[in-house]
Amino acid sequence: MDRDMFEKGLSIRRAVLGADYVDKAIASADDFNRPIQELTTQYCWGEVWGRPGLDRRTRSIINLAMISALNRPHELKMHIKGALNNGLTKEDIREVFLQVAIYCGIPAGVDSFRVAQETFKELGI
């Protein structure tokens, strides 16, 4: 593991998803799932999210669309919160999910709206 890239990724991951969430995920890692936490933090958050080519807001838009298309509600909820942290509004998120509904199918769009509503309610927005 590249420790410097892991630390860079950890910093970005905390900024986007929230330190409490990330620190809990890292702290609860055991011998079985620690490698996926390290891989995610170093490569996803350090190597890719840490690249200069796209800003975090744009990366959040892309993630919301892809995760919606893949039907990963747990990850979607987490990335909705991250998208809000990265400056997206509820209206921006709505537009992403309307686009998802057209290009990935109405069920994907409907589920994404449902997860977003649950997330907004949980956050009190």
Image (tube, grey):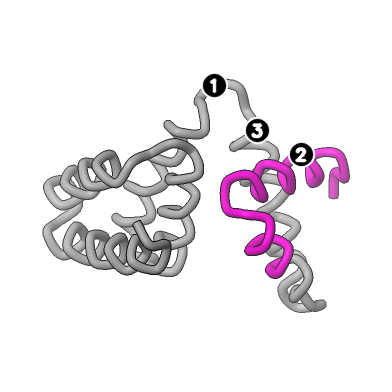
Q: What's the mark number on residue 50?
A: 3
At mark 3, the secondary structure is loop
Gap in angstroms between the C-alphas marked 2 and 1: 16 Å
**Residue at the location (44% across, 41% down)?**
60
Residue found 50% across the figure and 44% down from its top: 85
For this orientation, the residue located farthest to the top is: 53
Q: Amino acid at mark 2?
A: Lys
The image position of residue 124, as x and y in percent, is: 38, 62
Of residues 105 and 58, which is closer to you in this image?
58
Instruction: Check if mark 3's residue and mark 2's residue have beta carbons within 8 Å.
Output: yes
Tell me the magenta residue range: 1-25
Say which mark, if any, is on residue 8.
2
Vertical relation: 116 (above or below) 96: below
Circle 1 Cα neighbour tier, 10 Å, few/some/many (<14 / 14–19 / ≥20): few
Secondary structure of the residue carrying tag 1 is loop
Q: Is residue 28 magenta?
A: no
- Amino acid carrying label 1: it is Gly
Foreground mark, 2 or 1? 2
Instruction: Name the quadrant of the C terminus.
Output: bottom left
Spot the residue most to the front. Answer: 124
Could you tell me residue 77's position as x and y percent? 42, 62
Residue of label 1: 53
Q: Classify residue 38 by image quadrant.
A: bottom right
* Type of amino acid at the residue the image marks with label 3: Gly
Query: What secondary structure do most residues of the magenta stretch adopt?
Result: helix
Say if 33 sits above or below 19 in the image: below
Tell me which numbered mark, 3 or 2, is placed earlier along the sequence: 2
Label number found at residue 16: none
